[in-house]
Image: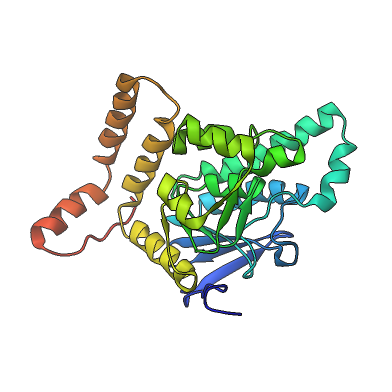
Amino acid sequence: MTATDSPTVPTAPARTVIELETLLLELRADGVAGLTVNRPGRANSQTVTMFHEFTDAALAVRDTGARALILRGAGDRAFCSGFDLAEVGAIQQMGVREFLRFQEAATGGLAAIRQLPFPVIAAIHGPAVGGGLALALAADIRLAAPTAKLSCAFVRVGLSCGELGTSWQLTRLLGYGRAAELGFTGRIVGAAEAERIGLVNRVVPSEDLFAEADALAAAIAGNSPGGVRMSKRALLRNQEISSYGAALELENRGQALLTCTEDMPEALAAFTEGRASRFTGR
């Protein structure tokens, strides 16, 4: 195992780990949480159970006081290689209503992660393919190792890129033309190209991937919890409306609410006194 293949994980503060069947949820004392896709022997491929557990994990972490979440894959092989082909047979046996319930559970699981009230950072190494790409797109920020390989692979298995929110996310991140190319070809996008076209925020050395994600999460966690949460709400919601006036209205309400918190006067006092802010989230 080489440094370029195996990212190192920094020493973490006191933590609690909740082990589900396919996921690991880590709650840390510093306000940074972690969610690991934990099927390294199957390239962290997705299962029917996993999609339900995404919802369970999101519900478990959202009200813990966490200020940021790092999303990653276990082992050194993959972030998430998409749906496990060993489970495709079960899906093929489903009737229309049963399959629709499965689709709703799958999309609901990723939506629950995307809609967490605090930022989600995906640390991507190796393949993020099909449903794995959709999982990465559910994060607010994506960091990638040079080994990252991203693909909207649905057309290669007879499906469309209109899956798990991918068509919506890609067009907004990349624009229609680039999204169309990736959706119609299913080709693999390497880390450098992904950074160039905006599919990931930046590429970092493999050995530094998780340390970089941790440092970014810590920087976010050091800011006003209310301010960060309201910022995420504004950024997400304003992707879904076409009116500039409606966007201003949402922003104005959020700012007005934040002036009623303890963190805003604390930040102003800290600035005046030349010291670091002591945010409480109250």
Colouring of the image? rainbow
Residue at the farthest left position:
272
Q: Is residue 102 left or right of residue 58?
A: right
- Taking depth in this image into account, of 274 and 143 the one nearest to the observer is 143
Instruction: Using the rendered view, name the quadrant where residue 275 is placed.
Output: bottom left
Residue 66 visible: no
Residue at 65%, 35% (x, y): give it.
163
Residue 243 visible: yes
- Taking depth in this image into account, of 221 and 266 the one nearest to the observer is 221
Image position, residue 246 (x, y; %): 34, 21
- Taking depth in this image into account, of 164 and 275 the one nearest to the observer is 164
Residue at 69%, 60% (x, y): give it.
44
Q: Is residue 130 left or right of residue 94?
A: left
Q: Is residue 234 left or right of residue 166?
A: left
Q: Is residue 265 left or right of residue 83?
A: left
Residue at the farthest bottom position:
1
Residue at 87%, 38% (x, y): give it.
92
Image position, residue 232 (x, y; %): 39, 42
**113 to 179, vertically: above or below:** below
Residue at 56%, 46% (x, y): give it.
113
